[in-house]
Amino acid sequence: MSRTSNVFTRVEPEIKEQAEDVLNKLGISMSNAVGMFLRQVVIQRGIPFEIKLPVNEPLAIGNLTKEQLDVEIAKGMADIENGRVYTVDEVEAEMHRLYGI
């Protein structure tokens, strides 16, 4: 067996748990998954997936001017008035369908 080295990292507990769930379903240990990632970094001479800012960045209230916030609130009110609303159960079902959470 070849020699190994330890890699220590910090990650949010929720992300770790979600990743472990996915990896367990795939039959891959966290250690093997990290090893596969690092091998791909070496083979591709960089991060093995595209990293870029999202096209539609989520709104952060702290980054909005009062005028921008007023516009967003007006959009939300218009959605309510036009019946474009979802129950918590509908949102949770869609999250589960899309992301398995």
Image (cartoon, rainbow, N blue to C red):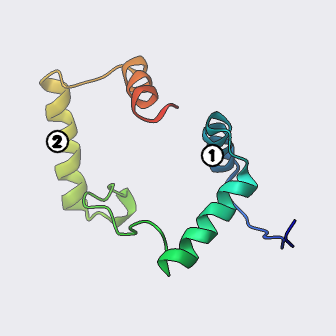
Q: Is residue 52 above or below residue 90?
A: below
Residue at 79% x, 68% y: name it.
8
Rate crowding at label 2 as few (under 14), some (14 to 19) or many (20 or more) other CA atoms within 10 Å.
Answer: few
Q: Helix, strand or loop at disc 1?
A: helix
Residue 46 in sight in this render: no
Q: Provide residue 23's location: percent of width, then percent of height.
A: 64, 43
Which corner quadrant holds the N terminus? bottom right
Residue at 68% x, 37% y: name it.
24
Three-letter residue code for mark 1: Ala
Residue 95 in sight in this render: yes
Residue at 31% x, 59% y: name it.
57
Q: Provide residue 56's location: percent of width, then percent of height.
A: 25, 57
Q: Provide residue 49's location: percent of width, then percent of height.
A: 43, 65
Q: Is residue 3 left or right of residue 34?
A: right
Read off the residue under disc 1. 19
Residue at 63% x, 70% y: name it.
38
Q: Helix, strand or loop at disc 2?
A: helix
